[in-house]
């Protein structure tokens, strides 16, 4: 059962990931971190590399914007979704070039089952940061919820090509493999 949710434009962005250039406003340190993340023989623990990437994604030159994002994340974590939404709406309006503000708003929309809104915000995230493995896997989860299994599989594979250490995605891919699905 697949839905009429318009996944194609976002899916196209994801398929173009390898050839797309991240926004120039992103810290250049991310380039080295992504190389290190993809290196399975890296001496730096993968958790440390991932944490540095998430920290850089969540950082902003405007300290108030960082504090607002932190407050929105805390509100989501504590289940205060109605408190998080206006904070994230404000951030994407005031800082439309901040990929992580879009990504957090996409996450909130997914939690609230507003999947079309989530897809829109995932697309905005990926236009700015095509390597955003969190947004790509979020797209995969939206696809799963609506029965778009091929798109979900492809998204999870692409997310793993960027961050090969996402074991939960490997498990999901295994569960989505044709020999594990009972198709009648």
Image (tube, rainbow, N blue to C red):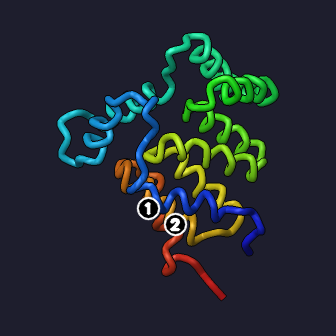
Q: Position of residue 183 (x, y in %)?
A: 62, 84
Give the residue displayed 65% in from the left and 22% down from the top.
74
**Residue 120, placed above or below residue 50:** below
Residue 172 visible (yes or no): no
Residue 181 visible (yes or no): yes
Q: Which residue is mark 2?
A: 153
Residue furthest bottom as drawn: 184
Q: Which residue is mark 1?
A: 157
Residue furthest front as drawn: 24
Q: Are marks 1 and 2 in contact (CB under 8 Å)?
A: yes
**Label 1 neighbour load within 10 Å: few <14, some 14-19, many 20+:** some
Label 2, secondary structure: give it: helix
Q: Nearer the viewer, residue 24 or 152?
A: 24
Q: Quadrant of the N terminus?
A: bottom right
Q: Nearer the viewer, residue 180 or 41?
A: 41
Q: Nearer the viewer, residue 120 or 183?
A: 120
Residue 81 falls left or right of residue 159: right
Q: Position of residue 80 (x, y in %)?
A: 77, 26
Residue furthest right as drawn: 82
**Label 2 neighbour load within 10 Å: few <14, some 14-19, many 20+:** many
Residue 38 falls left or right of residue 42: right
């Amino acid at each position: 059962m697949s839905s009429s949710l318009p996944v194609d434009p976002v899916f196209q962005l994801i398929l173009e990931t390898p050839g797309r250039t991240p926004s120039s406003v992103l810290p250049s340190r991310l380039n080295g971190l992504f190389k290190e993340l993809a290196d399975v023989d890296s001496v730096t623990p993968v958790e440390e590399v991932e944490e540095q990437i998430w920290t850089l994604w969540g950082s902003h030159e405007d300290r108030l914007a960082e504090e607002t994002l932190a407050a929105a994340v805390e509100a989501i974590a504590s289940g205060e979704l109605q408190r998080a939404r206006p904070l994230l709406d404000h951030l994407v309006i005031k800082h439309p070039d901040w990929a992580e503000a879009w990504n957090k708003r996409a996450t909130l929309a997914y939690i609230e089952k507003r999947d079309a809104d989530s897809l829109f915000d995932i697309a905005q995230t990926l236009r700015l940061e095509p390597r955003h493995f969190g947004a790509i896997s979020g797209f995969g989860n939206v696809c799963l919820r609506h029965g778009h299994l091929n798109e979900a599989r492809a998204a999870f594979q692409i997310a793993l090509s960027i961050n090969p250490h996402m074991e939960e995605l490997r498990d999901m891919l295994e569960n989505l493999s044709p020999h594990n699905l009972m198709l009648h």
